[in-house]
Image (spheres, rainbow, N blue to C red):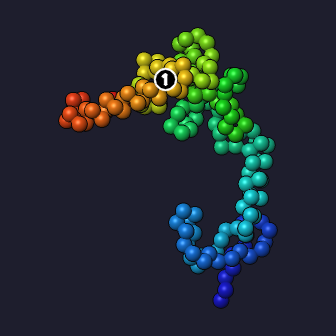
Amino acid sequence: MNKTKLCECGCGKPTIRILKNNKKLGRVKGEYNRFLRFHHLKILKKSEDHKKKIGLGNFKIGRILRRGYIYIYIKKHPYSIKYGVTRYVPEHRLIMEKHIGRYLKPTEVVHHIDGNTKNNIISNLILFPNQASHSKLHYILNNINKINKLKGGVNNGKNIS
């Protein structure tokens, strides 16, 4: 008995069997594909249209976490980043802007002293004029950590970041 599975895009056509295992894609040999080739794009297009219709899709207004950083919803900000159809600004940049009393330039970099990107207290933030000066700090800190490891851990095994 040959059970076939229909394409999940809604076209009603039968899909083909998977010939090889592929752990990356989560495919198991002998099972049926969920979609015919390129039919998953129809589903993606529908979900994008749906996000536009309802306004936000999966994005919540307020605070979101992306790539380890907290982003705050700001309606009008000159350097906001678009996620979905909503615009967000990294919280650490907003805190630094409030502290110095002006918008940060796109080239300016805010560094977290303790390395915790969610710790956005002003005493934990340093402003650098550009990425080059920020990279120099990391270069120096990495060299200090290497020297301490060679000496046998002057900092009691704790890394400086």
133 is higher (above) or lower (below) than 57: above
The residue furthest left is 152
Quick check: 92 left or right of 83?
Answer: left
Q: Is residue 147 above or below residue 125?
A: below
Which amino acid type corresponds to the residue marked 1 in the rendered image?
A: Ser
Q: Position of residue 119 (x, y in %)?
A: 45, 27
Along the line of sight, which residue is nearer the eye, 133 or 153?
133
**What is the x, y in percent for residue 57?**
70, 43
Say what secondary structure mark 1 lies in. Answer: helix
Query: Where's the C terminus, which quadrant?
Result: top left
Q: Residue at x 64, y 77 (%)?
A: 17
Residue 49 is left or right of residue 146, and the answer is right
Where's the N terminus, which quadrant? bottom right
At horizontal 46% and vertical 20% (from top left) the residue drawn is 126
In the displayed structure image, the side of residue 67 where residue 75 appears, left or right: right
Q: Position of residue 106 (x, y in %)?
A: 62, 24
Most foreground residue, 87 or 57:
87
**Does 24 sit above or below residue 109?**
below
Per the image, the residue denoted by label 1 is: 133
- Residue at (53%, 13%) from the top-left corner? 99
| Residue 95 visible in image | no
Q: Is residue 92 left or right of residue 37?
A: left
Residue at (31% x, 33% y) in the render: 145
Residue 79 can be seen in this image: yes
Q: Categorize mark 1 by other alpha carbons within 10 Å: few (<14), some (14-19), many (20+).
A: some
Percent from the top left, x then y, of residue 69?
52, 33
